[in-house]
Amino acid sequence: MSASIIDGKAFAAGLRERIGVLASAFEAAAGRKAGLAVVLVGEDPASQVYVRNKGKQTIACGMESFEHKLPAETSEADLLALVETLNADPAVDGILVQLPLPAHMNEQKVIATINPDKDVDGFHVVNVGRLATGLPGFVPCTPLGCVMLLKDQLGSLSGLDAVVIGRSNIVGKPMAQLLIAESCTVTVAHSRTRDLPDVVRRADIVVAAVGRPEMVKGEWIKPGATVIDVGINRVAGAQEGKSRLVGDVDFASASTVAGAITPVPGGVGPMTIAVLLRNTIVAAHRNAGIALDESAI
Ligand code: NAD
């Protein structure tokens, strides 16, 4: 193996430490803790784990966590009413509605009801527009975490060729916007891309956000490229009945060619909640009118 391993777990721990310092300074200045409200509708087991981890890490960073667990049969009107209450609550700086929502709810409508200045997930169209036009807003946590890892690894990204595989609203598209803002030359590949290996081979930076286990092979990677693997896929393990997590990149072959690569688990995954907490402390400062050098976090 020649690639250096990008340790997202360690980076996220450092980020949470910086947020903790900012959170206690915020509490001293504002006379209250920064607060994150997380709304979970239904009993989806994966969502329950995410929400529990978000709550734990919010408290560990010295912020207030408000958890709202609603039954799966909650009406859309009741959920929208809760979001409006949180919008109006001065103790709540950030609001996150855990997706996916039950089928009888319109996700876009729910996201559109969140006050964009409390939308720490960055999914509201106002924040999507702010990102596209270079205005300050909130950026989706996973792609922002990827850019933090890239800048930590490479310094300036200016002029580099980046290929993003995947065009989802949550990862691929905001990832492409962020890389454009970093002055990369960006290609977005997706399920209809012709000759994907050839497209990937041009890239100094490869970001894989596809959801297909070990799809990106080492022979697709330009020697020395930096590879960011967003994928989280559960596959059968070596022992019967056991499973393991793999990314969208075939780590064994890609790590012999790449200059640097994120592992799965322990790469991008731990960054998502840490960046959520970063967005929350940023929201708290903005909402309270307290100055903060956001670029230094
Ligand atoms: P998605 O299903 O919304 O989008 C997948 C994208 O991949 C689509 O744009 C599609 O065009 C593209 N695609 C599908 N098949 C392809 C192919 N054969 N070749 C090229 N492109 C193809 O998924 P998503 O929400 O963007 O998530 C992608 C992956 O990232 C998943 O594994 C998900 O679990 C993971 N994820 C991880 C985190 C994290 O915290 N690390 C956060 C979000 C998503």
Image (cartoon, rainbow, N blue to C red):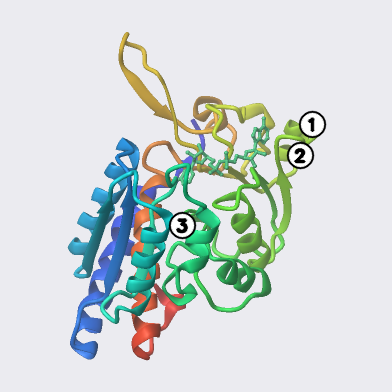
Secondary structure at badge 1 equals loop
Residue where numbered disc 3 is placed: 145
| Nearest to the observer: residue 287 or residue 71 | 71
Q: In the figure, is residue 225 to the left or right of 236?
A: right
* Mark 1 and mark 3: Cα distance apart in space: 28 Å
Q: Give the x, y percent position of residue 26.
A: 25, 83
Label 3: few (<14), some (14–19) or many (≥20) C-alpha neighbours in 10 Å: many
Q: Which mark is residue 199?
A: 2
Q: Give the x, y percent position of residue 52.
A: 24, 49
* Mark 1 and mark 2: Cα distance apart in space: 7 Å
Q: Which mark is residue 195?
A: 1
Quarter, ligand 1 = top right
Dot 1 amino acid type: Asp
Q: Which mark is residue 54?
A: none
Q: In the figure, is residue 222 to the left or right of 98?
A: right
Dot 2 amino acid type: Val
Residue at image point 39% right, 49% down: 8
Secondary structure at badge 2 equals helix
| Nearest to the observer: residue 63 or residue 17 | 63
Q: Is mark 2 within 8 Å of ligand 1?
A: no
